[in-house]
Amino acid sequence: MAATTTTTTTPLGFVLPTGLSPRRGGFRFSLVRCSASPLTSSTASGTVEKPWSSYNARLVLEDGSIWPAKSFGAPGTRVAELVFNTSLTGYQEILTDPSYAGQFVLMTNPQIGNTGVNLDDEESEQCFLAGLVIRSLSISTSNWRCTKTLADYLTERNLMGIYDLDTRAITRRLREEGSLNGVLSTEQTKTDDELLQMSRSWDIVGIDLISDVSCKSPYEWVDKTDPEWDFNTNTRDGKSYRVIAYDFGIKHNILRRLSSYGCQITVVPSTFPASEALKMNPDGILFSNGPGDPSAVPYAVETVKELLGKAPVYGICMGHQLLGQALGGKTYKMKFGHHGGNHPVRNNRTGQVEISAQNHNYAVDPASLPGGVEVTHVNLNDGSCAGLSFPAMNVMSLQYHPEASPGPHDSDNAFREFIELMKRSKQSS
Ligand SMILES: NC(=O)CC[C@H](N)C(=O)O
């Protein structure tokens, strides 16, 4: 699809917008329908075939591009921020990762759905993301753990999914322009202009998305990683540690890994008072992953501040970003973030490189951090901060996902490091 800047009627019969001003300046694209193939062709009899007549959905991006697609999930109209994920597998974990609230996820892997879905790969009770965008929906579903097709799963969970659009072209656009807001719709009564306006009048920045996904009351977590799937078991010391896990949108696999390492876990809501947490006399506190803008949740940063120095703490992704702020640093929005299972990270202390699973659109600015806070890990793709430590207060955090669900397990040792931190702190008290 070639980009066009004309503002008249296109050869496809599409009327380009007049008087629409982009939410952010500088878009190179006007409202234009994008497709990999010509949309009409004449037959010998003179009738016009309409190959797009089976297209019953549209993705309209805030840059004015329109992507006709086919729906394979719930009908409706949703606005969200579009991000791309480069993981080859793990779409079910992605669908149930609460950190994707407020986002559409576009999978760059062209074929999705071939393993269906199963009962064990859920990362939370619900699908929190706004919709799934894929190139091709597998025509067959085949896996020994499969209990349902992806399409049935999405429909049951009232989640939108679209396929048969040029996901490579959209990914290139996101890489060039940065993250884009968009509207996904199956409603034919809504005009393209309406959907475009919707995408331009919405913003994920500055919104607290944590309160929608966090649990409402504390609960105990006991499940471990299934022994058949577990690895790295020889590093366990057989001791038990009492951990409070702040749920900012926690993934089950973080809890499973902590449990497998011997932690007795109480999961608490994002608004749980620090004073109550301390009354439970924890050996350590975990701040979980979670959706949205970390600078939009000052109440969570306050809680983290109150807990600093009182027990060893471990932050993962959103938890890392909250810790960064609690230590005096700032977060910023990245151009298009990191979402995938193949990000190289250097551990500055050992010099070793881990291939990691990542999912974030914000990062901690290392220049904003006070003295004594050490950047322990660096993302080798762009040099951004991927891990922090503040030994004086027994703080460790990672911007990425040691629980790696989906993803490679190179970083699993971070859970052992948290155990060591708790152990040392216990011995010295
Ligand atoms: N996985 C997460 O915790 C995401 C953190 C944060 N919402 C971001 O996008 O950067």
Image (cartoon, rainbow, N blue to C red):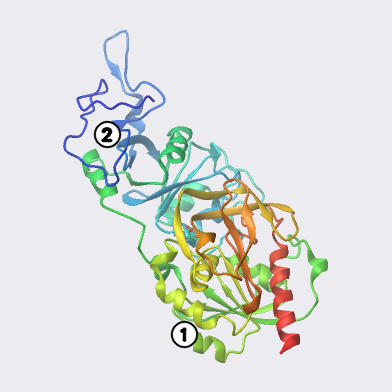
Q: Residue furthest front?
A: 371
Q: Amino acid at mark 2?
A: Leu
Residue 247 rendering spot, x and y as whole percentages: 51, 73
User: Quick one: label 1 or label 2, which is nearer the N terminus?
Assistant: 2
Whether residue 302 is visible to the viewer of this picture, yes or no, is yes
Q: With respect to residue 184, does 120 lie above or below? A: below
Q: Residue furthest bottom?
A: 279
Q: Which residue is mark 2?
A: 31
Residue 222 rendering spot, x and y as whole percentages: 64, 76
Q: Amino acid at mark 1?
A: Pro
Residue 363 rendering spot, x and y as whole percentages: 50, 58
Residue at screen point 58% across, 89% down: 280
Marks 1 and 2 sit apart, C-alpha to C-alpha, by: 48 Å
Residue at screen point 66% across, 74% down: 391
Residue at screen point 45% across, 74% down: 300
Residue 174 rendering spot, x and y as whole percentages: 43, 40
- Indicate the quadrant where residue 177 lies: top left
Q: Which residue is mark 1?
A: 273
Q: Is ligand 1 closer than 8 angstroms to the Cβ of mark 1? A: no
Element type at marker 1?
Answer: loop
Dot label at residue 419: none
How crowded pointer 1 is (Cα within 10 Å; few <14, some 14-19, many 20+) is rated as some
- Indicate the quadrant where residue 219 lies: bottom right
Is 174 positioned to the left or the right of 27 in the image? Answer: right
In the image shown, does 189 or 238 lie closer to the viewer? 238
